[in-house]
């Protein structure tokens, strides 16, 4: 099953299979999400979830703490390399 990801800041849409990590979006939409480490320690893949947050895997406490340390304490911010896609979402890849 494929889910639609709307990239609001780029006015684009892409699709990824169920349970894909959002960082995989860079493979289908070149440069859509910046990333470096893919393990949740660099912070380069911070995204803002504008709608569909319930369609992402839940944030682990370590992810929340790291985002807070970066100044992104609000729940709408996630690390693309840490969340799995469970349904359609709209995101801003340059918060």
Image: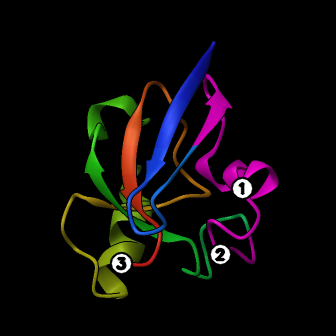
Please say whether residue 3 is one of the residues in the magenta stretch.
no
Q: Secondary structure at mark 3?
A: loop
Write down the residue under mark 2.
34
Please tell me which of labels 1 and 2 falls first in the chain. 1
Image quarter in which the N terminus is found: top right
Lateral position of residue 63 relative to residue 42, left or right: left
* Rendered residue at 54%/26% (across/down): 3
Write down the residue under mark 3.
95
Q: Position of residue 9 (x, y in %)?
A: 40, 69
Q: Which residues are magenta?
A: 14-37
Please tell me which of labels 3 and 1 falls first in the chain. 1
* Rendered residue at 71%/55% (across/down): 29
81 is higher (above) or lower (below) than 56: below
* Rendered residue at 36%/47% (across/down): 90
61 is higher (above) or lower (below) than 84: below
Dots 3, 2 in contact, CB < 8 A: no
* Rendered residue at 62%/82% (across/down): 42
Q: Secondary structure at mark 2?
A: loop
Neighbour tally class for label 3: few under 14, some 14-19, many 20 plus, Cα within 10 Å: few
Q: Residue furthest front?
A: 11
Q: How is the image coloured?
A: rainbow
Neighbour tally class for label 2: few under 14, some 14-19, many 20 plus, Cα within 10 Å: some
Q: Residue furthest top?
A: 1
Q: Position of residue 20 (x, y in %)?
A: 66, 35
Looking at the image, how many numbered discs can be counted on the residues? 3
Q: Residue 29 versus residue 66: which sits nearer the camera?
A: 29
Please tell me which of labels 3 and 2 falls first in the chain. 2
Write down the residue under mark 1.
29
Mark 3 or mark 1, whichever is nearer to me: 1
């Amino acid at each position: 099953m494929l889910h639609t990801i709307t990239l609001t800041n780029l006015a684009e849409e892409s699709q990824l299979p169920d349970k894909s990590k959002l960082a995989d979006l860079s493979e289908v939409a070149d440069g859509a999400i910046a990333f470096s480490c893919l393990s949740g320690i660099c912070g380069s893949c911070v995204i803002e979830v504008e709608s569909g947050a319930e369609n992402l895997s839940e944030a682990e406490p370590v992810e929340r703490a790291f985002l807070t340390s970066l100044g992104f304490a609000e729940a709408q911010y996630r690390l693309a390399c840490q969340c799995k896609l469970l349904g359609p979402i709209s995101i801003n890849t340059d918060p």
